[in-house]
């Protein structure tokens, strides 16, 4: 059996930010589709962190917002590396023909 105990009556459990969830999901989906979703994830992640900090503990999800930002930047970095690799391959192809 698990050792999970529900919070005591009257304890406030912060609601998770919808922006934080969206930031993380879009950044992960952006890894397998297109880097544009990673950029949206970065923007939503920063917006969610701002909202979470301003809520004074009423909204949670800062870990998801940070994950969305980090995965989004990884996504953008991979896209830049991919574009650079394509340019190098094209230049090598032009030089050898």
Image (cartoon, rainbow, N blue to C red):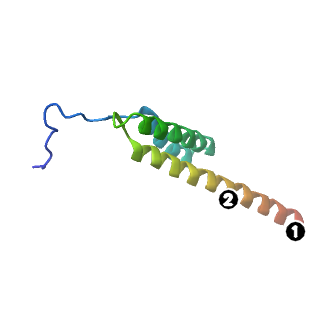
Q: Residue at x 62, y 45 (%)?
A: 35
Residue that carries the numbered disc 2 in the rendered image: 81
Q: Position of residue 20 (x, y in %)?
A: 44, 38
10 Å neighbourhood of mark 2: few (<14), some, or many (≥20)? Answer: few
Q: Position of residue 86 (x, y in %)?
A: 74, 57
Q: Residue at x 60, y 43 (%)?
A: 39
Earlier along the polypeptide chain: callout 2 or callout 1? 2
Q: Secondary structure at mark 1?
A: helix
Left or right: 18 with respect to 93?
A: left
- Tell which residue pokes out farthest to the left in this image: 1
Q: Residue at x 47, y 41 (%)?
A: 49
Q: CA distance from mark 2 to mark 1?
A: 23 Å
**Image vertical order of residue 90 relative to residue 25, above or below:** below
Residue that carries the numbered disc 1 in the rendered image: 96
Name the foreground residue: 6 vs 31: 6
Q: Quadrant of the C terminus?
A: bottom right
């Amino acid at each position: 059996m698990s050792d999970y105990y529900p919070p005591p009556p009257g304890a406030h459990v912060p609601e998770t930010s919808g922006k934080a969830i969206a930031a993380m999901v879009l950044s992960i989906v952006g890894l397998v589709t297109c880097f544009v979703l990673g950029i949206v994830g970065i923007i939503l992640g920063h917006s969610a962190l701002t909202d979470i900090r301003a809520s004074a503990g009423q909204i949670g999800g800062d870990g998801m917002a940070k994950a969305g930002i980090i995965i989004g930047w990884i996504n953008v970095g991979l896209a830049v590396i991919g574009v650079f690799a394509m340019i190098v391959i094209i230049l090598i192809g032009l030089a050898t023909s």
